[in-house]
């Protein structure tokens, strides 16, 4: 693939979107073309499935049915947005991807072998080269979400945000064990740190993973003042 694919994962209120925007600006400042997208959603068809999933309308299908809908949304997203962007040579930054299904639907009790099958079908070989897991204790993440929904018109927590603290903490542990199992593609960043510290950690993960594409970026620009 000529392009590069980076996914961001983490629990609610981890701060993924802020870090994605910062990484996008950095990459653009290096002359890269960047596509920012998210799951569930990211393409017109998948956005329709997103609203069904997040409103809770699909809850009656049970976790296995919901997992199928996440996979259907992902398949459309991959075919109509992610793969074409990677084929063009763009950098794709995706807010959640297949790991979220492993964690959220896995925590809800869906069998791993079944989730693996869905994942293989949905991603069609398109897997992230780097996954940045922004890790925050569930309590901190949820209090950020509560703050955020006071100041926007989202109408309170969605289907997945509104679950018990223990559920969120279990998801956190599942993300962390996934990161251990597939350490070759994961960078775990402490999301409780100040934004700038988190940003620096994200940047170093990206520079370490793609040294040939971003080489020399840390060197200071040549001083233009004629002091010699
Ligand atoms: P979103 O508002 O995008 O949440 P966030 O800002 O936390 O990313 O909502 C996505 C919700 O859907 C989130 O609670 C996680 C959940 N989800 C799954 O359960 N399975 C999945 O495969 C994906 C992609 C998301």
Image (cartoon, helix red, strand yellow):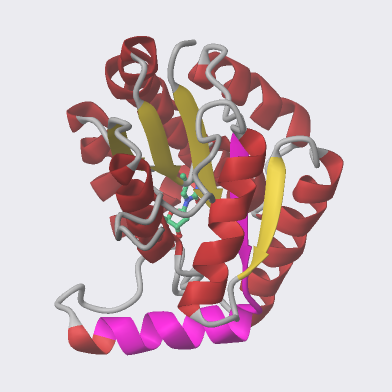
Q: Nearer the viewer, residue 216 or 154?
A: 216
**Image: 133 above or below 27:** below
Q: Quadrant of residue 107?
A: bottom right
Q: Residue furthest left?
A: 153
Residue 90, position in %: x, y?
34, 24
Residue depicted at 21% across the width and 38% down the height? 48
Q: Which residues are magenta?
A: 130-149
Let me know if residue 143 is in the magenta part: yes
Residue 203, position in %: x, y?
54, 54
Q: Main secondary structure of the magenta part?
A: helix
Ligand 1 location (quadrant): bottom left
Residue 30, position in %: x, y?
35, 39
Let me know if residue 59 is in the magenta part: no
Q: Nearer the viewer, residue 118 or 128?
A: 128
Q: Can the viewer see residue 41 in this picture?
A: no
**Image: 84 above or below 18:** above
Q: Nearer the viewer, residue 10 or 44?
A: 10
**Image: 41 above or below 200:** above
Q: Residue furthest front?
A: 228
């Amino acid at each position: 693939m000529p392009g590069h694919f980076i996914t961001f994962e983490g629990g609610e209120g981890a701060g993924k979107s802020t870090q994605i925007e910062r990484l996008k600006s950095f990459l653009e400042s290096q002359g890269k073309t960047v596509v920012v997208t998210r799951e569930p959603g990211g393409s017109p068809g998948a956005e329709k499935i997103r609203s069904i999933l997040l409103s809770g309308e699909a809850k009656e299908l049970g976790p296995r049915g919901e997992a199928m809908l996440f996979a259907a949304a992902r398949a459309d997203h991959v075919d109509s947005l992610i793969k074409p962007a990677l084929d063009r040579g763009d950098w794709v930054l995706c807010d959640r991807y297949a790991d979220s299904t492993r964690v959220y639907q896995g925590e809800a009790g869906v069998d791993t072998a079944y989730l693996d099958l869905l994942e293989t079908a949905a991603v069609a070989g398109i897997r992230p080269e780097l996954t940045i897991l922004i890790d925050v204790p569930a309590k901190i993440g949820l209090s950020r979400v509560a703050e955020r929904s006071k100041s926007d018109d989202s109408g309170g927590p969605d289907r997945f945000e509104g679950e018990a603290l223990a559920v969120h903490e279990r998801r956190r542990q599942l993300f962390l064990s996934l990161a251990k199992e597939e350490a070759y593609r994961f960078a775990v960043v402490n999301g409780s740190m100040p934004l700038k510290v988190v940003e620096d950690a994200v940047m170093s993960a990206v520079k370490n993973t793609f040294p040939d594409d971003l080489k020399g970026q840390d060197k200071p620009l040549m001083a233009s003042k004629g002091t010699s």
